[in-house]
Amino acid sequence: MRFIQSLLTLSLVAAPAFAAPITESDNPISSTDETKPTKVLSPRAPFVTCTPKKNETKTKFIVDVAVAEREMKEAGLVTDKSGDPHHYGNFDGFHWGVHECDDKKHQLWEFPIFWVGSKHRWQKNQKTFMQAEKTPIRVVYADVNNTPHYCGIMIHETVKSNYQGTDHFEKCE
């Protein structure tokens, strides 16, 4: 009994020390030394919102980034019957904020994905006109040594009432 009381007391005293924030100098992946590169990792948002300039639907397009990354990996770097995935030329001039994606030496790809709440999934081995539903959203990724590398998500500027996307793209944030 006394052991449990001692353990409980010790844990109550130690808890605030373990909960203290890590300072910049304690952080092993960050450096204030200007001779060393800083490697602070910023967390990726678990969801992004896609806002087309014109939306003829009442849908709010929210995309789960983890699902987008999984579908990107499954889509790979080989075009199938649907015509997807396919190369993306970034004529919209997006800066993805990811070195591999902004470096022109890596080919960019795009693949159709759906938003949270949709029960559909793009079938790359099925012709586009045979798909159960249209989607204006694309996951963009770079070919880095034959491996898909996530860049971001974009949506067509105009979304028709049947979810067909037209015009250029808007980056999802």
Image: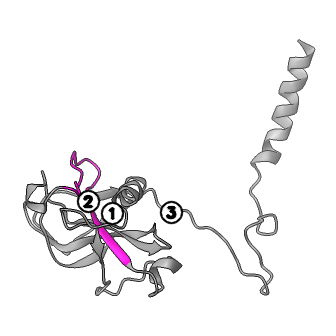
Along the viewing direction, whichever of 117 and 151 lies nearer the viewer: 151
Relative to residue 164, is residue 143 drawn left or right?
right
Circle 1 crowding by C-alpha within 10 Å: few under 14, some 14–19, many from 20: some
The earlier-in-sequence mark between 3 and 1 is 3
- Report x, y in % for residue 74: 37, 55
Mark with earlier residue (2, 3): 3
Q: Are marks 1 and 2 in contact (CB under 8 Å)?
A: yes
Distance between the Cα atoms at labels 1 and 2? 6 Å
The residue that label 3 is drawn on is: 44
Residue 123 in picture, x, y percent from top left:
22, 54
What is the C-alpha distance between the residues marked 2 and 3? 18 Å
Residue at label 1?
A: 49
Say which residue label 2 marks: 61
- Left or right side of 126 for 149: right
Q: Quadrant of residue 22?
A: bottom right
- SS at mark 1 in the image: strand
Q: Which residues are magenta?
A: 108-125
Query: What amino acid is found at the position of numbered circle 1 in the picture?
Result: Thr
Indicate the secondary structure of the residue bearing disc 3: loop
**Secondary structure under the numbered disc 2 in the rendered image:** strand
Residue found at x 39% / y 80%? 107
Residue 173 seen anywhere in this rendered image of the structure:
no
Q: Position of residue 166 (x, y in %)?
A: 13, 75
